[in-house]
Image (tube, rainbow, N blue to C red):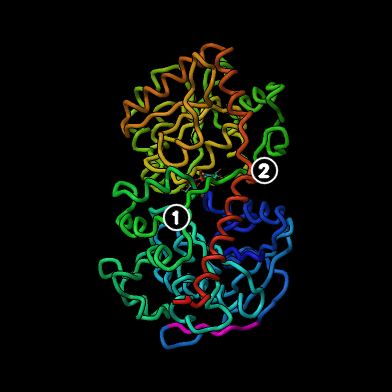
Amino acid sequence: MRILFVASEALPYTKTGGLADVIEALPKALVKLGHEVAVFLPRYRGVKANTVVMPSMTIPQGGRLRFPAITNGSLLHGVRYFFLDDPFYFDREGIYGDRKHEYPDNAERFTEFSRAAIEMTKHIWPPDIIHCHDWQTAMVPVLLHSSYADDPLVKDLPVVFTVHNMGYHGIFPKEALERAGIPPAVFHPGGVEFFGSVNFLKGGLVYSDYLTTVSRKYAQEIQTSEFGFGLEGVVRSRADRLVGILNGVDYSSWCPEKDALLPMKYSARNLAGKRVCKQALFEEFLLLHDNPNRPVLGIVSRFADQKGFDLIAEIAHELLQEDILLAVLGSGDRRYEELFRALAGDFPGRVGVKIAYDNRIAHLVEAGSDMFLMPSRYEPCGLNQIYSLRYGTVPIVRATGGLDDTIEEFNLQHGTGTGFKFTEYTGAAFLEAIRQALHHYSDDGVWKRIQLNGMAKDFSWNTSAAEYEKLYEAARAARTQKAVPSSN
Ligand code: ADP
Ligand code: GLC
């Protein structure tokens, strides 16, 4: 099969979150299964292109025409990369916005990107299926269904749409339709309209052939008002076309045996290197290192409401009465940056904070910590807790979405389980889970059992890539059946 991925970020080019990890690893895994895969991305500032493959394409927007180019990147691990090349829209300081605001022309930027993806399939790289990700690419199925409905080259092209996060809709005022060049015919309550505004994510949910999200549990959750952000009814109406497929992990990047970013590598057979990493973590975060056995709790995260840091704020002072250290790496919402800075000020040597986006330090926190905290309010999949498992760093997570699907509660009697979970979204429940973990940490034998249970888990992409493959086949088959005229 020829599969075209359309996404707003992907490693090794651009990353703000887990989406970029997925758009690097899943195409690679599909190539291994024997498919031809290309990835289409915007060329953001700093991304180098190789050659121009299409110097000018025509994109209508708001009564004007725009003429972006298509360039290409290298062939990496058998995956081809193409870029939408439009410096006016994409050669900017940020990807979705600057430090303070989202860019006001995001509707135009990502509609042009989606239209260009369709034009690319016509002129450069015709696929059997398009796989779109999140609201930034939702105009692909919307435009295929409207502007391109009569185009013989693309009208039967099936689209699979993956929701990585229901919390981001891409909502714009009605006037954005005209400015972005979206046909007004799709602006109705059964289309992209959402309480008088244009909702990109809704368009993706309504007009795609199949929908997926990134864990089984989250596929259930987004059908409820607690997790659907107002679109739960739309998701429910498409439940027969919705599948939860758990993200995998690219163990060539996230495995302590091969991790070149660590001061010393280690494995389940010999954990000596983990102690060296812990020492380096002490130094990096200026933490007390008089007692190498004192437990370190690590955090690596985007600072966003989703991630549950209000619970940390609630329990921090009580938690720090325990003999523990906290190492926090993250950036994003100012409120949480200030929260963690203040904690570091109140507890020098006990709370170490780096307000930064830094891949090397992210690897060091995964390796050097004893426990990893993810108290998310909601979590579609979550990758860090899965990385933690492989690094022998025991996750303490809220039992939601992918966190619940990937972490198994430790059971002392049977010696099974990989971490600690809490369900109620309260500081008390979170604290109780941490105390459980600390209790078991004090017994070396028990703790090693939990670490080894986690390190033995395999969340590589093989299984999930095969599930996507099946889904692509189903999406193609559904289109073929539709194209056959019925006999009665
Ligand atoms: P989300 O996509 O919601 O942010 P995930 O757990 O799926 O959450 O993925 C987050 C990814 O981003 C992981 O690869 C993680 O290591 C990385 N990451 C998050 N914050 C930082 C940071 N401050 N520095 C480096 N990497 C980070
Ligand atoms: C989103 C989600 C995260 C998920 C990632 C990749 O950013 O917040 O849970 O792991 O996408 O699918």
Whether the residue under disc 2 has CB within 8 Å of ligand 1: no
- Determine whether, in the image, residue 427 is placed left or right of residue 99: left
According to the picture, the residue beneath numbered tag 2 turns out to be 253
Question: Is residue 33 visible to us here?
Answer: yes
Element marked by disc 2: loop
Instruction: Pick the quarter of the image with the N terminus.
Output: bottom right
Name the residue at the left extreme.
195
Query: Which region of the structure is painted magenta?
Result: 55-61
Name the residue at the front extreme.
488
Q: Nearer the viewer, residue 181 or 124?
A: 124
* Residues at marks 1 and 2 touching, judged by CB atoms closer than 8 Å: no
Is 4 rendered above or below residue 11? Answer: below
Displayed quadrant of residue 51 = bottom right
Label for residue 242?
1
Q: Nearer the viewer, residue 315 or 428?
A: 428
Give the residue type that dot 2 points to: Ser
Residue at figure coordinates x 50%, y 78% from the top left: 485
Give the residue type that dot 1 points to: Leu
Residue at figure coordinates x 58%, y 54% from the top left: 468
The 10 Å Cα crowd at callout 2, few under 14, some 14 to 19, many 20 or more, is some
Q: Nearer the viewer, mark 1 or mark 2?
A: 1
Is 401 rendered above or below residue 346? Answer: below
Displayed quadrant of residue 203 = bottom left
Residue 63, horizontal then vertical, whole percent: 42, 88
Label for residue 420?
none
Is 384 rendered above or below residue 96? Answer: above
Element marked by disc 1: strand
Whether the residue under disc 1 has CB within 8 Å of ligand 2: no
